[in-house]
Amino acid sequence: MVEVTKDLPRSADGLAMDWLEVPFGPCFPGLPGGLKLTLTLDGDGVTEGQATSLVAMNTSSEEVAVETFIERLAAAMPLAPVSYRLLACRAIEQAAGLEPDPAVERGRAAALERERIASHLGWLAQLGRQLSFVWLTRRAAALQLETQRADREQLVALRPALQSLIARLEHTPLLKARLKGIGALPHGSQDLRGPVARASGRTEDARQADAMYRELGFEMRAESAGDAWARLRQRHVEIMTSLDLVEVAGDPELPKLRAIDNPSGTGEATVETPRGRATLRLTQERGQVVSVELDSACSQHIGLVADLVEGQELGDALVAVGSLDLSPWEVTS
């Protein structure tokens, strides 16, 4: 054995073992479909890893009518279609020189916050699958379905159920023990966005610069530990904040393009999606979108995986990656 293993790299415990490259996904419990996670294992330890999207969006497309572009972008983002529909509408309207309409923006904000609640509940259901918390998967998935099509009154009626779920999760010692200290982001991680950034104590939220959100009384709250437990608690806070915003804003209205007359120009818009800030820049000529540039949170966060999993036990590495809530569709190529 000494002769066979003499040239192999040594793990932290001094044992020499064959390193295995193991793929997880694109279909794996607790990770979103379409995400491929490749880990190099030394026994049950991870020496290195990387994540890639198998469904990444290619923004270099042919010319397309503005209405068609909106529908295509929304359909391309199945985990956040309302966010990206709104992003496209705002960029096109900005290119056309339209000023925001407060009445329209109020309904759009309510729709965006409803999607944020549903998205975070979907992530909780995914966490339940990964940790074999069957009750969590069933309860979060059921609430997600109720939320997705709910009007203001129905959402407000869900408040006790949402509060009960959050209270149960935060008072489950086994869950806290499993997540606390796991997936802490390396010091100096750059361009964190959304709940991942706010769970690390960063005041990063595009809604702070939105006049409608200031009118609705939006206040950002953040955790600070930066680990998987903090990211769980951050999403809990955001579920209730979003519910408060919907209650003030009124009934959600699916974003629709306001009346424009085949304009030409360049537009830019930013939306705080459930996973963080996304910015869309586009150029349109006579009602046709001719060029697109999309900067999304997941395009940045997918690069965190390598540092996050290195040196971790396999189970901890999978929990850490899952806590980022990566959407492979929101990664641009």
Image (cartoon, helix red, strand yellow):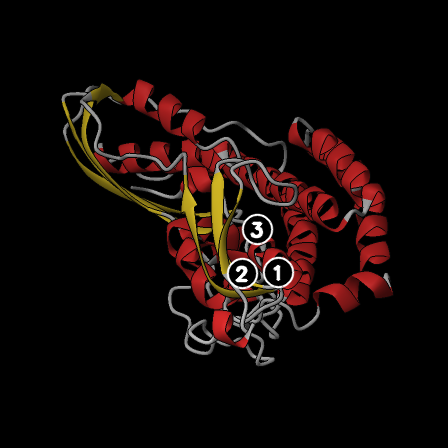
Q: Residue at x 47, y 51 (%)?
A: 38
Name the residue type under label 2: Leu
Residue 153 visible in the current orientation: no
Q: Are marks 2 and 1 in contact (CB under 8 Å)?
A: yes
Name the residue type under label 1: Leu
**Sequence-first tag of 2 and 1:** 2
Q: Residues within 10 Å of mark 1 (few under 14, many from 20)?
A: many
What residue sits right under mark 1 in the picture? 314
Nearer the camera: disc 1 or disc 3: 1
Q: In the image, is residue 164 above or below residue 46?
A: above
Could you say which disc has been placed on residue 216 in the image? 3
Q: Residues within 10 Å of mark 2 (few under 14, many from 20)?
A: many
The percent position of residue 18, horizontal first and vertical second, equals: 51, 62
Nearer the camera: disc 2 or disc 1: 2
Could you say which disc has been placed on residue 41 in the image? 2
Q: Residue at x 67, y 50 (%)?
A: 239
Q: In the image, is residue 306 above or below residue 58?
A: below
Pick the front one: 202 or 54: 54
Name the residue type under label 3: Leu
Nearer the camera: disc 3 or disc 2: 2
**Sequence-first tag of 3 and 2:** 2
Label 3: which secondary element = helix
Structural distance between the alpha carbons of marks 2 and 1: 8 Å
Label 2: which secondary element = strand
How many marks are shown on the rendered structure?
3
